[in-house]
Image (cartoon, rainbow, N blue to C red):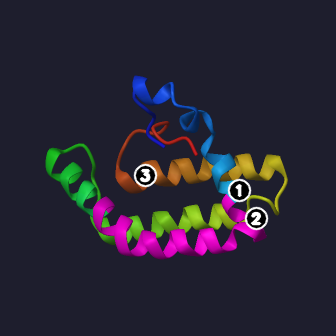
C-alpha cells in the first residue's frame, strides 16, 4: 500500500493493483483463503504491524494513540472491502476506496495520499 522499491517494480506481482487482490479474495471460491488470511492476520500480522506502529510513534513519523486496536480495526476495514468489492458497482467501490484511504491516513496520523488501495 505504501509503494514499492525499484527492484520490486520489475516484479510482476507488484504490478497487480491491490483492489484486484481484494476482488480475488472476496469471491466465494476464495472464502477459505480469506478466512485463513484473517486468522493469520490476527496471529501474525497484528503483532508485527503493532510493533511497526509503536516504532513509528517513537520516531515521530506516526501518531497513533492505540496501536494494536488501530491495526485490528484497519484490518477489519480491509476485510470489509474484500467482502463487498464484488457486490457493489465500480463507482461505489471507488468512493469506498477513497474513504478507506482517508481513514487509514487519519488513523495513523500521516498525510493524506500516502495510501492507495
Q: Reply yes or no: does residue 38 show up in magenta.
A: yes
What is the x, y in percent for residue 17?
63, 40
> Which of disc 3 and disc 2 is earlier in sequence?
2
Q: Quadrant of residue 12?
A: top right
Q: Are marks 3 and 1 in contact (CB under 8 Å)?
A: no
Q: Is residue 56 left or right of residue 112?
A: left
* Residue range highlighted in magenta: 25-49
Report helix, strand or loop for mark 1: helix
- Residue pointed to by mark 1: 24
- Residue pointed to by mark 3: 106
Q: Residue at x 60, y 45 (%)?
A: 18
What is the x, y in percent for residue 77?
56, 64
**Front residue of this view, candidates 65 and 90:** 90
What is the x, y in percent for residue 30?
70, 67
Q: Is residue 70 left or right of residue 102?
A: left
| Whole-number angstrom distance, CA of label 1 to CA of label 2 | 6 Å
Q: Is residue 92 left or right of residue 60?
A: right
The answer to whether residue 12 is above or below residue 117 is above
- Residue situated furthest right in the rendering: 89
Which of labels 2 and 3 is toward the front?
A: 2
Q: Is residue 77 left or right of residue 43?
A: right
Local packing at callout 3 (Cα closer than 10 Å; few below 14, some 14-19, many 20+) is some
> Which of disc 1 and disc 3 is earlier in sequence?
1
- Residue situated furthest left in the rendering: 58
Q: Are marks 1 and 2 in contact (CB under 8 Å)?
A: yes
Local packing at callout 1 (Cα closer than 10 Å; few below 14, some 14-19, many 20+) is some
- Residue pointed to by mark 2: 27
Q: Reply yes or no: does residue 30 show up in magenta.
A: yes
Amino acid at each position: 500500500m505504501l509503494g514499492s522499491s525499484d527492484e520490486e517494480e520489475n516484479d510482476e506481482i507488484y504490478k497487480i493493483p491491490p483492489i484486484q487482490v481484494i476482488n480475488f479474495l472476496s469471491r466465494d471460491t476464495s472464502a477459505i483463503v480469506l478466512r485463513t488470511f484473517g486468522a493469520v492476520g490476527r496471529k501474525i500480522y497484528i503483532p508485527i504491524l503493532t510493533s511497526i506502529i509503536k516504532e513509528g510513534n517513537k520516531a515521530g513519523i506516526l501518531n497513533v494513540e492505540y496501536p494494536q486496536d488501530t491495526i485490528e480495526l484497519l484490518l477489519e476495514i480491509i476485510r470489509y472491502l474484500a467482502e463487498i468489492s464484488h457486490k457493489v458497482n465500480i463507482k461505489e467501490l471507488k468512493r469506498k476506496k477513497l474513504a478507506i484511504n482517508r481513514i487509514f491516513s487519519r488513523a495513523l496520523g500521516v498525510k493524506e495520499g500516502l495510501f492507495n488501495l
